[in-house]
Image (tube, rainbow, N blue to C red):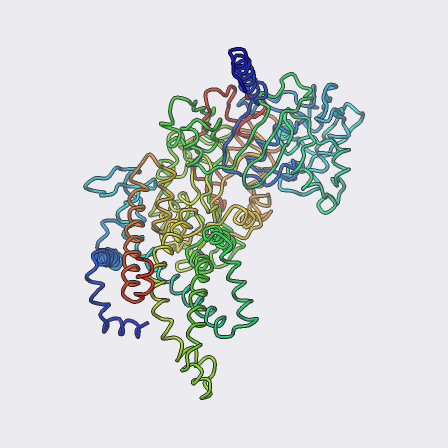
Amino acid sequence: MSAILKKFKRSKSANSIWRQPLAVVGIVIILTWTILAVFAPWIAPYDPNAQDADKFLTPSAQHWMGTDELNRDIWSRIIYGARISLPYSLLLVFLSATLGSIIGAISGYAGGKVDSFLMRVTDVFFAFPGIVLAMAVAAALGPQIRNAVIAVTIVAWPVYARLVRGLILNAKQNDYVTASALLGSSALRTMVVDLRPNLSGPVFVLASLEVGNALLLLSGLSFLGLGAQPPAAEWGSMVSMGAVNFDRWWVGLFPGLAILTAVLAFNFIGDSLRDALDPRTAKALRD
Amino acid sequence: MKLNFKSIASIALSSAVVTAGLVALPANAATKNLNVETVFQLTSTDPARSFEQTGNMINRALYETLLTYKGGDASTPVPGIASKWKVNAGATEFTFTIDPKAKFADGTKVTSADVVFSLNRLKNVKGNPSSLMNGITVAAPNAKTVVLTTEKATPQVLAIVTSPALGILNSKVAKANGASDAADAATADKALEFLKSKSIGSGPYVLKSFNLTTEVVLEKNTKYWGASMAGYDKIIVRNVPVNVQRLNVIKGTSSIAVDLSPDQASGVGSKVNVVTGKASNVFFFYLSQNSEFSPATKFTSDPKCVEAARYGINYNKIVRYAGLGAIQAPGIIPSFFSGALKQKAAIKQDTARAKAAFDACGIKDTPVSIGYWGDGGAVNGLNFGSLAALVDEDLRAIGFKTKLVGAPIAVSLPLYRENKEEMGLWLWGPDWPDSTNYTESFSPGTKVGLRMGWLAGQDSVITDLQTKAATATDPKKRAALFRSWQKEMNKRSPLIPLVQPAAILVANKSVVGVQDHPIWKVNLTELK
């Protein structure tokens, strides 16, 4: 990862990303959420779980975003919610990218029956709608945020496996791979040393585009009661409380906006990174 | 084709006739349906195994019992399958005469043999409601008479026989499909799946289809023997989250919403009636503490731990959350029943006392888990997760290292029932409408007592009061015993009563006869 970043900083791409307004907007939003999350104890006006106010207070100077049915300050909960939603989304993208890349690399490099078997397994996962499969896994494991991360990881890895397999199949035709094999490199060494540099960029781009989806999926599971559990301040479960009390608009609207801004921001950044790191795909999409 | 006036007129006339016919057809064929929406508390439609609120509501319409109640009443039994009954002076022998008109949906007559089979099956199948038959033996001296006997005075038998779990099955059909009433019925009975596909009762409705997660459909029993036929051709009981229930009520697409809280029932428009029960709801939420889960937490073995939790909870906050009409549960017996405690007897939060008790109990850094119905589980609009969050906040404030462990009901309920939860946030609805239901279920060594690791013989004072209350026949003495029992329970039982929510139903104005009932919530057979 650090190698990619170093390469990225040295490249013209780093300059080009700052010239894209949407990328800047995305970075500013994510930075803002990160600052809010890191400094939540100092920024949040109330303890996110304190039940001292009255229930369903409308937004006011005391409670900027009102209070929920358990008398808790919604703005404070949204700030603390960033501590769950953002890091867990990044974690599960990291996990699914790692898992998918390993499976895809093995599949592409080994070929033959191993490739067929792993790709059929991948097809099985693709055959189910993501949210349904994630719900089934989360329900089976028990509702808590850790299990929701596992559930979404299980849903999200196949896309990386497909990508990496395709890249490996292409790359292993190159002479330097054959030369490496002739010099006695093991399969592991060939994959890690010779092939990995070809994969990092596209996987990184895909991962950055998937963070928004991961955040949505994770929030969706919490919305359904299969993710974060009370009293945790998590954006999806907060929207769920808003859905039950839908005529108290502020209960669901503000955490919904938090999800919206974060997902949009990640998508802006992902798009811009794709333009910078993977210009061929970006051009194909533009054309 | 050459068109002239005659042909145009005949085409127009034919079209008009066909159109009129098509328009008239749905009107003639239209069925009168009722949509009931609730969050399912349902395991099956086998009376001997179903003991949850939704199951009671459905089985009340499929199976009839010896006696029953009308409307929202739960104090004066009226004839069911039995047209007459008498009780001996010692309240140990109950004789029921079966109505000669009573017949099952397939047209066969109900006999005393069917009653004996059904009640013995309930007892021996050892399902969750089997405890209703504890201490009761059933016999049939002749085809029309059934006698229930108990060893000691048990005046509550007349209330017990109204429970839908004591619904009468057609014994011949049941046996032909694997049912057994033998002593080994717990393993020998194989009729569960059959009874989820077909009902074999004598009620005004029959089972059309059963799906544990989506809907249960009932159809009119066209051969119903009783005076009042089913009011609807079809009743669809749907498993619907509370927020969607509310939305459907506002849109006017549901007939009855069962689970709305008073807050949610406000502002739902002019098309609906909000039906309020006679009192606050008969079910109550409670926090249980289990000594057998982990010796480290010392619940029940060290009364100080229980005391810390009991006085640490802010009950007013919970009542406010439950909304208009809710009350703090001052004891275990809800205000609906004889011997309920007055509000002034309710536990008041005392954080100083709670903190002192917590320090004395010595579980300072021991993590304590609280199990509950997660994944959005709610009853009467009260979300278990939200209630757990309220309790969690209070217990943390006095030093407990609590951890909330929600799970879907299919997971969490068995954990609680099998004594595998450290602390649990649950609710209790009466199995039969009498205060003995509580003394017989929550005392040491009884059903709920055992779920908390509270074994028989661990509290002789409470057990003594339980025994006396069970056999007392004088209403005033009974009520006094129930009060004493609750006061002792409030001092040291591992169960902390929290809140009795308001009893409300929200129904479309077109539905007549909606009343809240403590056992089956809605009597589907009375709706027109």
- Name of the residue lying farthest toward the front: B2
Q: Is residue B127 at least partly visible in the picture? A: yes
Residue under the image location 43 percent in, 29 percent down: B249
Residue B280 horizontal/vertical position (percent): 45, 29
| Residue B227, horizontal then vertical, whole percent | 65, 16
Residue B155 visible in the displayed image? no
Q: Is residue B47 left or right of residue A76?
A: right
**Residue placed most toward the observer, B507 or B437:** B507
Residue under the point 23% across and 63% down:
A17
Which quadrant is the C terminus of chain A positioned in? bottom left
- Relative side of B193 to B270, left or right: right
User: What x and y, as percent, mark residue B31?
Assistant: 57, 23
Image quarter for residue B524?
top right
Say which of A19 and B364 sits in front.
Answer: A19
Q: Classify the position of the N terminus of chain A by image quarter.
A: bottom left
- Report the front residue among B487 and B191: B191
Count every numbered label the image shows and give the total. Answer: 0
Write down the quadrant of residue B62 in the picture.
top right
Residue B516 vertical position relative to residue A229 in the rendered view, above or below: above
Q: Residue at x 39, y 38 (%)?
A: A244
What percent of the width, then of the height, locates residue B9?
52, 12
| Direction bottom: furthest residue | A183
Compared with B42, B157 (above or below) is above
